[in-house]
Structures are given as structure tokens and as C-alpha cells.
Image: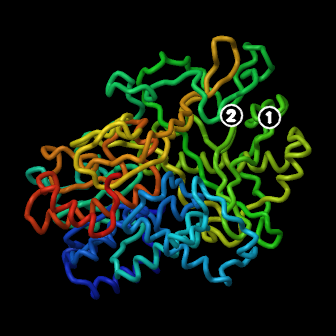
């Protein structure tokens, strides 16, 4: 998280300034005032898609990206797309996957395996859908190139490594309208409309918009799967055998093993400040010419993974169940089982933490996960069959080259969630209701990862928070869920940290949906400018007409 712009991007940004209208140099200082009709904060998939839509509608746009790499998690390791029902993915989101299809049609892109050797397994859909000319499974660097192509083809003005000043002086608001915000570099961004497309919701928070962090009690919205969920096991990411949490098994006086909380479990359905666990979606390779051994991380201590050794000793053998295959003999490796890549309970303060604290949390996740992989590949406690197979895997030489072959994006599964004009709730995300003014659709299960690891009353260890409930059918997402209350802010749209309960967000939080909502947010922003109204006052009929013209899918 360096706060000094790399020389290359500084030069590029400076040159670009004179090629685009709407820019003004503040001559009294070295900082700059940059103006556009729409200012987008974030470098995620939603941010880039939103910017493309603004340009397509004829307005000026600036992307202010704290990230150097574009695409967020879509280019950061999550290549095994959480599609749900692919038929509800439309507009520019679908175009993203169509561009991936075109890329992989070229045989020269299959460097480490032949195309016909790859197979065609996706998550609920074929990986390569020839009928619809879409590709749902892909390598990180390929996805990043698609986002860069979007940017280049639409001549997007992007300023990278620009971090929002989250202090009181970081934003100027007049009568509920954002006039500008500034970054830590001192640059000022002025616009008519603003879009917060970050995973964290930092601009939303600085703008004074109401939000929630953590799990609401079930009683808040009349839900079943929100709040604390002890002894609910819907994904298999729990301890299936009785495992002692103590350093000396069954001796509570010996102290707890690492990665276990001593905090007692709260009442079922109660709310708390806990959020589902984060991890890095690792891209791994088993091609001998394209893999490097897992590095031994600084401060590595095998005792940290004793709990996993005990899980293996109990007979568990699901280590490789989420080594999901992506092209060129690589994986999108995700959390699986009771003790895996999810760093449970170590992210509670991330959503509202300072940049420095977030940097520390991200580093802790990296060290934990690298240590886990090193442990699996090298420790004597690992069963022989697992140890032998682990030797086939390593980090790919051709991914994340500027970051030691490690993903540049931590999976921020959930952070702040806005409390906006309309709150998407459990029943909405299960397809049981008809929401007002739909702007896109979702279809994935209510998918929440574990939020804590605790000691049960019987003295054994268990995880809590892992939920997976499938909707009755694909569901619509309400326009009001990306809008703050008008009295709080009347020119901001929030397509990622949407207004949603914790458990409804478990379904909405998928990358295809973020791109869908990014496009819809941008459409609403431009139409609001054209009609000289706030997004909250924009007639839905006008918004719906443009969304349908642009092939967004709004309802069944």
C-alpha cells in the first residue's frame, strides 16, 4: 500500500491530463484538481465496468483507483467464477466473459496444456459455453488484460495508487451533495456524480452515509440465517470429529492451540461485530516448468498448524477438494474444510481500520496462508498421500509477477454494508419477494463463510458462521439498494457495499453481480445528470428503458 505514485504512472497520468478535457491544474501547489461528470473511486471490476458505461453514455469520467492492478478479485485469483444461473448475467458483465471466451479460442493462449486437455467443468455451468460464447473460468493475468483492454478501448482516464483521504478534510459536501474529495497525494477530484466501487466502502463512509458492519440479529429483519449460527453445518467447513483445542490434548490447563478464540459462543440468532473470514484465492500450478515451491514465510512456526495436523489424524482427507481447475494447469484454490485458507476471526476490524492497520491485516493473512501451504508441503505430520500430492503444486511463475507470484488482492468477502433507500434481505435474495425497481439480478446461494472458531461446552473445537442456502429462483436487486438515503447524500451510488443484510449479501457479493450493479449505477448517474435530478429522484421508467436497451437482465 505505497502512498507514492510509481514514476511510470505519474508520467502516464501527467501526459494523459493534456489529452482529456475537464482537467484543471491548481497552479498554487503541486497538487492537481481533476474534474469529470462522474468520479469513480475504486479499481475493482465494478469500477471499470461503471466507467465504461459512463463513457458509452457520452459523459466524462475519472477512475480514482487505490489499486495498481485493475479488476479487484476478478483479476486477483478468483477465476472459478461464482456464476449461479448464468442466464441472469447480462450487459457489460456478460461482455467481460465473452471477451475471455474470445481470448481462449486462440490455441496460442494454451501454453501449458492443450485446450482439449482442459475439460469443461465450471461452477454450475460449463467453463467454456460455446452456445453463448462465454468463458466463465480463467487465469488471473488474462482477466486483468481484459480490464486493461476495456480501459484502453474506451480511453478511460485512470489515476492509480490514489488513496482517499479518510479524514474530515478528505471530502467537501454542500447541502448533502459531494462537491469533491481529495486523496493522500493531495489531488482533488470534482464531479457531478460519484460512485464508490470499493470493497470497503471508504468513500461512502467519509460522505457520512449510514452503514453496518457485522451480523444483524435475526430479529432485525425477520431472518433465519443471519446472526450467530452455532451447530449449523451447510458446507462441510466444520470439525467433523471431536478435536481437542488444547496444546496438550484434553488438558485445558495447557492453554489453547493457535487460531482458536477463547470467547464463548453467543446466543443463536444474536447479532455481533463479526464478519465472514477472508483469504487469498491462490492461483497454483502443477506444471513442472511453471511452478515454484511454496516459500517458507518469515516467522514460520509449524505449531501454528497443529490443529490441522489433528484434523488429518482424525482421518480427514479433503485437502484438494477446492483446487478448482482453471486453464493452463492452474487452480483457483479456495478454502475447504475445518482448517484451511480462511483466516477465521482475524479480520473483524478490517472494514473501518486505518490504511496501515489494513496493510498489517493483509500481511498477516498472507503469512498465515503461505505458512499453511509450506506446512502442507513440508511438515512430517502431513499424511504421506497428502504430502506426495502436495509436491506437485506450487505458485505459478507467470502470475502476479510483480508480487512474488502471490495474489495482489485479498478476498474481502464483506466489509461495510450501506443502510440505504432499500435494504436487500434474506427473503429477497431467496427469490421469495418482488423487490421494487430492479436494476439487475443475482442467483447464487446465501453463502457466508465461518466467522469464528470457538470451544464448545463439551470441550472440543468448532467453527461457526458457515451458511449455504440456495434461492428458490434467481432474484432481482432493487435500485434502492445502491442508493444512500437522499438526506445523507444525493449524488453518490454504491454498487459494491450495497444496502443489504449480512446474509443477503452472502449471495449478492459475487463478481458478476458487482459488474452488473456497477453498470446500473453508472447508468443512473448519467441519467441523473441529464435530467438534473438526484439519483433518488430519477424516474425509474427512464432508468429501466436504458438498462434493457443495454441488455441488462432485470427480472424473470
CA neighbours of label 1 inside 10 A, class few (<14), some (14 to 19), many (20+): some
Q: How is the image coloured?
A: rainbow
Compared to 408, does 199 lie above or below? above
In the picture, the disc for residue 332 is none
Q: Quadrant of residue 495?
A: bottom left
Residue 337: x and y in percent read: 69, 37
Q: At 34% from the left edge and 40% from the top edge, which residue is drawn? A: 500
The location of residue 390, given as percent across then percent down, is 82, 53
Out of 317 and 160, give the one closest to the viewer. 317
Q: Are marks 2 and 1 in contact (CB under 8 Å)?
A: yes
Left or right of 401: which side holds 183? Answer: left
At x 12%, y 50%, the residue is 176
Near-viewer residue (510 or 261): 510
Residue 554 location, x and y as percent?
31, 55
Q: Residue beneath label 2, please?
A: 338
Residue 110 on image: x %, y %: 69, 77
Q: Is the residue 78 above or below the residue 483 in the image?
A: below
**Distance between the alpha carbons at the discs numbered 2 and 1:** 10 Å
Q: Secondary structure at mark 2?
A: loop
Q: Earlier in the sequence, mark 2 or mark 1?
A: 1
Determine the residue positioned at 24% across, 41% down: 422
Against 62, residue 258 (above or below) is above
Q: Nearer the viewer, residue 401 or 495?
A: 495
For this view, does 533 lie left or right of residue 481? left
The answer to whether any part of residue 113 appears in the image is yes
Query: Which residue, given by chain and number where applicable, does mark 1 sit on?
Result: 316
- SS type, badge 1: loop
Question: Is residue 189 among the parts visible in the rendering?
Answer: no
Write the residue at 20% across / 79% down.
22
Amino acid at each position: 500500500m505505497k502512498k507514492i505514485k510509481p514514476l511510470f504512472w505519474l508520467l502516464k497520468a501527467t501526459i494523459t491530463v493534456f489529452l482529456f478535457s475537464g482537467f484543471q491544474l491548481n497552479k498554487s501547489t503541486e497538487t492537481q484538481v481533476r474534474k469529470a461528470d462522474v468520479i469513480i473511486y475504486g479499481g475493482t471490476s465494478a469500477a471499470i465496468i461503471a466507467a465504461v458505461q459512463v463513457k458509452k453514455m457520452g459523459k466524462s469520467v475519472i477512475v480514482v483507483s487505490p489499486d495498481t492492478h485493475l479488476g479487484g478479485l476478478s483479476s486477483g485469483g478468483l477465476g472459478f467464477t461464482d456464476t449461479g444461473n448464468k442466464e441472469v448475467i447480462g450487459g457489460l458483465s456478460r461482455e467481460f466473459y465473452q471477451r475471455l471466451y474470445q481470448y481462449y479460442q486462440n490455441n496460442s493462449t494454451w501454453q501449458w496444456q492443450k485446450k482439449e486437455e482442459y475439460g469443461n467443468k465450471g461452477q454450475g455451468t460449463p467453463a467454456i459455453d460455446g452456445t453463448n460464447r462465454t468463458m466463465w473460468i480463467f487465469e488471473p493475468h488474462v482477466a486483468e488484460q481484459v480490464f486493461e483492454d476495456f480501459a484502453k478501448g474506451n480511453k478511460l482516464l485512470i489515476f492509480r495508487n490514489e488513496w482517499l483521504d479518510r479524514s474530515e478534510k478528505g471530502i467537501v459536501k454542500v447541502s448533502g451533495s459531494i462537491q469533491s474529495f481529495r486523496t493522500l497525494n493531495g489531488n482533488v477530484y470534482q464531479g457531478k456524480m460519484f460512485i464508490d466501487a470499493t470493497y470497503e466502502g471508504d468513500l461512502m463512509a467519509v460522505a457520512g452515509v449510514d452503514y453496518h458492519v457485522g451480523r444483524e440479529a435475526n430479529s432485525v429483519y425477520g431472518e433465519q440465517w443471519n446472526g450467530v449460527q452455532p451447530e449449523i453445518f451447510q458446507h462441510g467447513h466444520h470439525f467433523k470429529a471431536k478435536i481437542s483445542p488444547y496444546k496438550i490434548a484434553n488438558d485445558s490447563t495447557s492453554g489453547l492451540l493457535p487460531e482458536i478464540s477463547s470467547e464463548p459462543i453467543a446466543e443463536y440468532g444474536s447479532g455481533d461485530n463479526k464478519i465472514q473470514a477472508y483469504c487469498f484465492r491462490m492461483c497454483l500450478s502443477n506444471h513442472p516448468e511453471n511452478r515454484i515451491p511454496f516459500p517458507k514465510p518469515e516467522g514460520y512456526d509449524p505449531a501454528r498448524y497443529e490443529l490441522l495436523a489433528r484434523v488429518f489424524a482424525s482421518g480427514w482427507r479433503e485437502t484438494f477438494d477446492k483446487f478448482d481447475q482453471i486453464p493452463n494447469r492452474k487452480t483457483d484454490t479456495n478454502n475447504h474444510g475445518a482448517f484451511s485458507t480462511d483466516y477465521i476471526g482475524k479480520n473483524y476490524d478490517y472494514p473501518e481500520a486505518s490504511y496501515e492497520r489494513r496493510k498489517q491485516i493483509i500481511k498477516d493473512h498472507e503469512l498465515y496462508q503461505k505458512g499453511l501451504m509450506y506446512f502442507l508441503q513440508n511438515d512430517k505430520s502431513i499424511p504421506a498421500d497428502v504430502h506426495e500430492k502436495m509436491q506437485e503444486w506450487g505458485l505459478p511463475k507467470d502470475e502476479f509477477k510483480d508480487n512474488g507470484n502471490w495474489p495482489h488482492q485479498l478476498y474481502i468477502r464483506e466489509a461495510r454494508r450501506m443502510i440505504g433507500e432499500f435494504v436487500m434481505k434474506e427473503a429477497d435474495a431467496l427469490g421469495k419477494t418482488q423487490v421494487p425497481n430492479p436494476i439487475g439480478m443475482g442467483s447464487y446461494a446465501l453463502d457466508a463463510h465461518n466467522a469464528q472458531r470457538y470451544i464448545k461446552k463439551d470441550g472440543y473445537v468448532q467453527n461457526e458462521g458457515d451458511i449455504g442456502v440456495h434461492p428458490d429462483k434467481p432474484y432481482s436487486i432493487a435500485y434502492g439498494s445502491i442508493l444512500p438515503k437522499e438526506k445523507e447524500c444525493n449524488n453518490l451510488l454504491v454498487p459494491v457495499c450495497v444496502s443489504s443484510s449480512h446474509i443477503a449479501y452472502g449471495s449478492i457479493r459475487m463478481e458478476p453481480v458487482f459488474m452488473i450493479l456497477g453498470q446500473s449505477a453508472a447508468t443512473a448517474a448519467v441519467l441523473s445528470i441529464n435530467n438534473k435530478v438526484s439519483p433518488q429522484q430519477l424516474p425509474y421508467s427512464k432508468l429501466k428503458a436504458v438498462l434493457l436497451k443495454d441488455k441488462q437482465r432485470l427480472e424473470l
